[in-house]
Amino acid sequence: MKTKTVLPAVAMTAVSMVLTLAVVVMWLGQMVPWPVALIVGLGIDGGWLATLAYERRLAAQGDHSDAVTAVGWSFGLIAAGVLVAHALTTDGSTAAWLAVSWLPLAAKALWLVHGLWERTALTPTALDAIRGIQQEARDEAAVARARLRAEAATEATRLEAVTGAGARVARVTAKTAKTLAGAWSTLEAARAGEDTGRALTSVTARVTPGVTPRWELPVWGPVEPVVVPALEGPALTDDELAALVDEIRNSEDPALSYREMSSRFRAAGHSASEVRLRAAWKRVA
């Protein structure tokens, strides 16, 4: 992964240095002796390369210097300025020279990107751990989404079933109410009919004297629940209940079944829960 950022920076640096040196020698060689122009070009490239090497050394030690960075960018700006000045003073091909005048700054920017990558680079172990954590989070999210979808589908099915059952109950209730209303109308018509009233009065007068000729309609509405009186008498113990069950069971030959014994037990006025009565039957049978 390191080569993906360092190789472009190295290539751009080499191209920028060669281009800067060639431009300085060609441009200044017309005005000063070419050895002087060569020294100027090497000075610009050398300063640029020296500051870059020092920056790389500081980065390898985990350190950073703003002064060295500023000097390096200054050499880069000088090299770019030389290329721009050459492009503007050259007769013809101005656009072509301007197009390549940004190469020193581009090389500097690539080294900046490479430095940022080095400061944020992680070991393979850390990357594997991060990938594992991300995969685990994705798995948990997928399971949660599947659970929510399943719960939503189940709830929708339940609501449909409840709604369907409610609709069926409503239809049956409406049908029953319609039937009761028709029967009630029939009773009301029979009660209000003059001929029906005379017929009922003539029949009931001979059979049950003193009955009111006009009979009343049955009550259609809420009724009071029937209150079952509590059974009196003390509760039987398990031994007493077993003895009583055995006595009733063997009162006939062959012995009575549980159903017959239970009927006679209740008919005799005894009381016991079904669970206790069946348990006593199992103990004696």
Image (cartoon, helix red, strand yellow):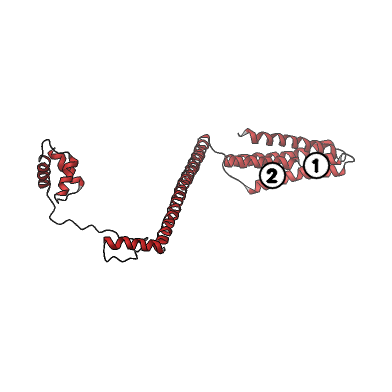
Query: Does residue 185 appear anywhere in the picture?
Result: yes
Q: Quadrant of residue 187?
A: bottom left
- Residue labelled with disc 2: 72
Would you identify the image quadrant in which residue 221 lies?
A: bottom left
Q: Categorize mark 2 by other alpha carbons within 10 Å: few (<14), some (14-19), many (20+).
A: many
Callout 1: 10 Å neighbours few (<14), some, many (20+)?
many
Is residue 284 shown left or right of residue 81? Answer: left
In percent of width and height, residue 223 lies at 33, 60
User: Is residue 28 among the parts visible in the rendering?
Assistant: no
What element does badge 1 sit on? helix
The quadrant where residue 278 appears = top left
SS at circle 2? helix
Amino acid type shown at disc 1: Leu
Q: Does 41 appear above or below 177? A: above
Left or right, 26 with respect to 205, comes to right
Q: How many numbered dots are placed on residues in this image?
A: 2
The residue that appears at 72% across and 41% down in the rendered structure is 106
Residue 142, label in figure: none
Quarter of the N terminus within the rendering? top right
Identify residue for label 1: 83
Please provide percent x and percent y for residue 104. Answer: 74, 41
Q: Nearer the viewer, residue 30 or 100?
A: 100
- Please state which amino acid type lies under the numbered disc 2: Gly
- The residue at 81%/44% (across/down) is 84
Q: Residue at x 20, y 45 (%)?
A: 275
In this rendering, would 57 be left or right of 179?
Answer: right
